[in-house]
Amino acid sequence: MISIKRKTKETDISVKLEMNNPSGGPINTTVPFLDHMLYSMSFHGGFYLEITASGDTDVDPHHLVEDTGITIGSALEEARIKANGIIRFGERKIPMDDSIAEAVIDAGGRAWLEWRVEWAQEKAGDFDLFLLKDFFWGVASASKMNIHINVPYSQNGHHAAEAVFKAFGKALAQAYRPTGTGENGMSTKGVI
């Protein structure tokens, strides 16, 4: 089990992650929509994710959303290092009613976010959907992962967001499968 903590003047976040444990864990970020998305991601990805987070959401949930992404990304990077070699690449397309989302990732040591999402609505409930780009940039930068997210069409922002998190969870499960080959087996360079 990997445990990562991140505490700033704006947020206090604790993440526990185990990629080979499908049991799931409690998620409480104090932002209910984000909790719903993260639970969906870990459930469909088949990995254990436990999060306790608090922050200055009275100002704006931005800091909490972004820092949660950074903390999850840090846990994923630690999982990659401890695995002694992973598949590295993952991809999945997931439909949800009117929406379809695609997540393609490379856990190969370089951070990049390609975000091709236009929301049909600005909000899901009272959650600003544009904050999800900040979340995924946090994950990408801290995990040193290429993340490409594409939603070619949708009519419902909630459905599109949920399809994104489900697709990302499935792509993570594929990419982070251990191989035991070390970094030698992950790159023609012999290192990540």
Image (cartoon, rainbow, N blue to C red):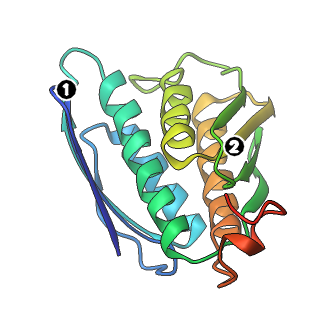
Q: Report the amino acid beneath label 1.
A: Glu
Quadrant where the N terminus sits is bottom left
Quadrant where the C terminus sits is bottom right
Q: Report the amino acid beneath label 2.
A: Asn
Secondary structure under the numbered disc 2 in the rendered image: strand
For disc 2, the neighbor class at 10 Å (few under 14, some 14 to 19, many from 20) is many
In the image: residue 115, left or right of residue 24:
right
186 over 139 or under it: above or below: below
Residue to which mark 2 is pinned: 146
Residue 114 pos. (x, y %): 73, 30
Where residue 88 sits, quadrant-wise, is bottom right
In the image: residue 151, left or right of residue 77:
right
Where residue 185 sits, quadrant-wise, is bottom right
Residue reaching furthest left?
A: 9
Measure the C-alpha gap from mark 2 to mark 1.
27 Å
Secondary structure under the numbered disc 1 in the rendered image: loop
For disc 1, the neighbor class at 10 Å (few under 14, some 14 to 19, many from 20) is few
Residue 6 pos. (x, y %): 25, 44
Kindly identify the residue that appears in the image at 76 percent across and 60 percent down. 89
**Which is nearer the N-term, disc 2 or disc 1?**
1
Residue 13 pos. (x, y %): 24, 45
Kindly identify the residue that appears in the image at 37 percent across and 47 percent down. 71
Kindly identify the residue that appears in the image at 28 percent across and 44 percent down. 29
Residue 72 pos. (x, y %): 42, 51
Kindly identify the residue that appears in the image at 77 percent across and 35 percent down. 150
Q: Which mark is residue 10?
A: 1
Total count of labels: 2
